[in-house]
Amino acid sequence: MADCKVGGKVMQKEQQQKKYHTKSKDAIRTYLNTHREHSFSAYDINEYMQEQGIQVNLTTIYRNLDKLMESGEIMKYKTAGDEFCRYQCTRPHAQCHEHIHMQCRECGKVLHLECGFMEDIVKHLYDHHKFTLECSGSVLMGVCAACRKNTDSE
C-alpha cells in the first residue's frame, strides 16, 4: 500500500480515503440515513441531490453506491417490475445477506424476514426442488399491514 505525506505525517491511502469527504458523498450518506427502511435507486438519489441544490452526475452516484456495496453498507437487487437496479441499506440488519426481504408495493418499505422460518424455507427449496436460495437480493413483493389498513378503511 502506498504512503502519502500529509502535513508532516505519513498516512496510508486507505486511511486518507476514509477521511476524504465531498459534498455529494455526504449528501448520499444523509439520504441513506433517512431512507434506511425503503429501497431506492440511483435516480432517487439524483432527484434528492437536485432538490438539495447539489449538482452531481449519475456516474458519481453509481461510483459511491458501488463503494457502499463493497463495504457491505448497502445491497443491490433487481425486481421483475423495475427497469433498473434497486438498493437498500443493510444496517442495522447485520445478516441482511442471509434472509429474504419483503417490500411493500404501496409505500416502498422494506421488511426483513429475520426468523427461524428462513431455515425451513431454504431447506424445503433444496430438499424438494433442488434449488439453492441466494437470499442476497431476494425480494418478495406485496402490501404491508399499514398500507392494507389504509386501503381497507377507504
Image (spheres, rainbow, N blue to C red):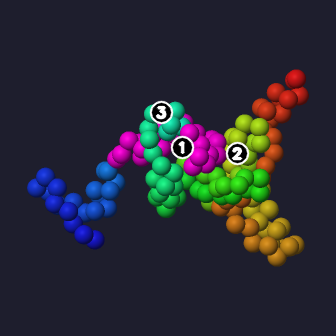
- For numbered disc 3, what is the local secondary structure? loop
For the residue pair 33 and 120, the one nearer the viewer reads as 33
Estimate the spatial distance between the alpha carbons at disc 3 and disc 1, rounded to whole Å: 10 Å
* Amino acid of disc 1: Asn
Residue 72: x and y, percent? Answer: 52, 58
Toward the bottom, the furthest residue is: 130
**27 is within the stretch colored magenta:** yes
Question: Going 80% across and 62% down the picture, which residue do you hit?
Answer: 121
Between discs 2 and 3, the one toward the N terminus = 3
- Local crowd size for mark 3, using a 10 Å CA cut-off: few (<14), some (14–19), many (≥20): few
* Residue 151 shows in this picture: yes
Circle number at residue 112: none
In the rendered image, which residue does mark 2 sit on? Answer: 111
Q: Position of residue 95 (x, y in %)?
A: 60, 56
SS assignment at label 2: strand
34 lies above or below 125 = above
- What's the distance in space between the residues labelled 2 and 3, CA to CA? 28 Å
Q: Quadrant of the N terminus?
A: bottom left
Single out the mark in the foreground, 2 or 3: 3
Please provide the residue range marked out in magenta: 21-47
Disc 3 marks a residue whose amino acid type is: Gln
Which label sits on residue 52?
3
Q: Nearer the viewer, residue 135 or 14?
A: 14
Query: Magenta includes 151?
Result: no
Would you say residue 73 is visible in this rendering? no
Q: Residue at x 46, y 53 (%)?
A: 60
Q: The disc labelled 2 sits on which kind of residue? A: Leu
Query: What residue is pinned by disc 1?
Result: 46
